[in-house]
Image: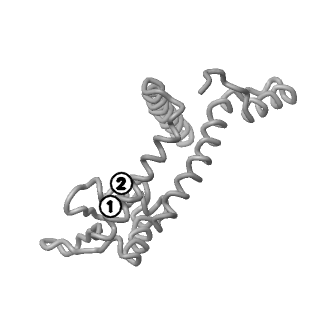
Amino acid sequence: MSDRIEPDAVDDIVHQWERQWPDLDVSALHIFGRMHRSYLRYQSSLSAVFEKHGINVASFDVLAALRRAGPPYQMTSGQLAEMSLVTTGGVTLRVDRLEQAGLVERERDATDRRVVYARLTAKGKEVFDAAAEEHFENENRMLAGLNAPERKQLADLFRKLEHSIVASETTIDSSASA
């Protein structure tokens, strides 16, 4: 792969803005435009892999959280919501679909009947493991154009970007409440 970077659609869009509205600072498009376009391509690739296994991205998130929990592969809706940044109501809908598909089952805690766990079934573990292997191979293929130091640098930059976004949200929240 060549190190020469060809202009892309984002460059074209930025140049169009520069011609049409020179005083408008659209420099963030260099980052967010590419990030968005990359995300759309990534999402499409993810969906294709997961569809082969009869699941979607939301299902994969729940199954992954349960699988990472280790045996007995169970968590409460609250724990799943915290892991996936989704409301407990959203998790309930996801778990309902997975339960209907036979990939998870619900079980009440033996000592506190108010606590309900979502637990990965044997079929769920089998489906998830096959999907996860293909998914992570696919992600590595998508990153094949980056060497190990570039991958680390990009990961570090995305971490820094997320912190910057969170800080900007905090600034917006505090100015709105003032």
Name the secondary structure under disc 1. Answer: helix
Q: Amino acid at mark 1?
A: Gly
Q: Residue furthest left?
A: 111
Name which residue lies at 66% across and 37% down: 33
- The foreground one among 169 and 20 is 20
Name which residue lies at 26% across and 68% down: 117
- The foreground one among 54 and 1 is 1
- The foreground one among 91 and 30 is 30
- The foreground one among 87 and 40 is 40
Check if mark 1's residue and mark 2's residue have beta carbons within 8 Å: yes
Dot 1 alpha-carbon crowd within 10 angstroms: few under 14, some 14 to 19, many 20 or more: some
Quadrant where the C terminus sits is top right
The disc at residue 82 is: 2
Name which residue lies at 59% across and 53% down: 44
User: Mark 1 — residue?
Assistant: 78
Mark-to-mark CA distance, 1 and 2: 6 Å
Q: Amino acid at mark 2?
A: Glu
Quadrant where the N terminus sits is top right
x, y percent for residue 18: 81, 26
x, y percent for residue 24: 77, 27
Q: Residue furthest top?
A: 4
The disc at residue 154 is: none
Above or below — where is 175 with respect to 84? above
